[in-house]
Image: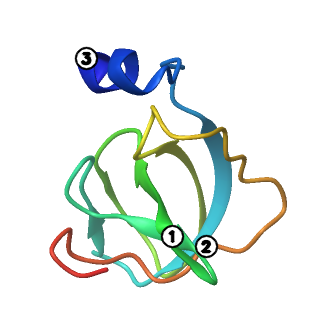
Amino acid sequence: MTSLGKLTATKRRGAGFALCDVGLEAGTMLEHDTNFAHVLGEPDNRWTPVEDFTAPTTGTHRLTFREDVTWQAERRLSSQTLGVTSDPSSP
């Protein structure tokens, strides 16, 4: 990524982070760098949990997500809603 950034004159920046409320059923596991969520209407704007998490109860849990792509133009997750978490092979 760094080399590609140099070729395209794109500056590499640190990943963005966002604290999000996520509705999960008890026992649902979200794995860092395996499960991803995206901003609704922006399937390429993907986020992954900062650390693995297993929901201890059914309900809303507050999790920190990290931006998946760190070298693209700056994107921020403000009060936008995340879509369904997914397998990394699905968009």
Disc 3 on helix, strand or loop? Answer: helix
Circles 2 and 1 in contact, beta carbons < 8 Å = yes
What amino acid type is highlighted by mark number 1?
His
Residue nearer the viewer, 61 or 84:
84
* Secondary structure category for the residue under label 1: strand
Q: Residue 82's mark?
A: 2
Q: Position of residue 46 (x, y in %)?
A: 45, 60
Q: Are marks 1 and 3 in contact (CB under 8 Å)?
A: no
The residue labelled by disc 3 is 3
Mark 2: give few (<14), some (14-19) or many (20+) Cα within 10 Å. Answer: many
Vertical comparison of 34 with 91: above or below: above
Q: CA distance from mark 1 to mark 3?
A: 26 Å
**Residue 38 has which mark?**
1
Q: How many angstroms separate mark 3 from mark 2 (CA)? A: 31 Å
Image x and y of residue 75, in percent: 67, 47
Above or below 62: residue 64:
above
Q: Residue at x 51, y 30 (%)?
A: 15
Image point (51%, 40%), residue name: 72
Q: Is residue 64 above or below residue 4?
A: below
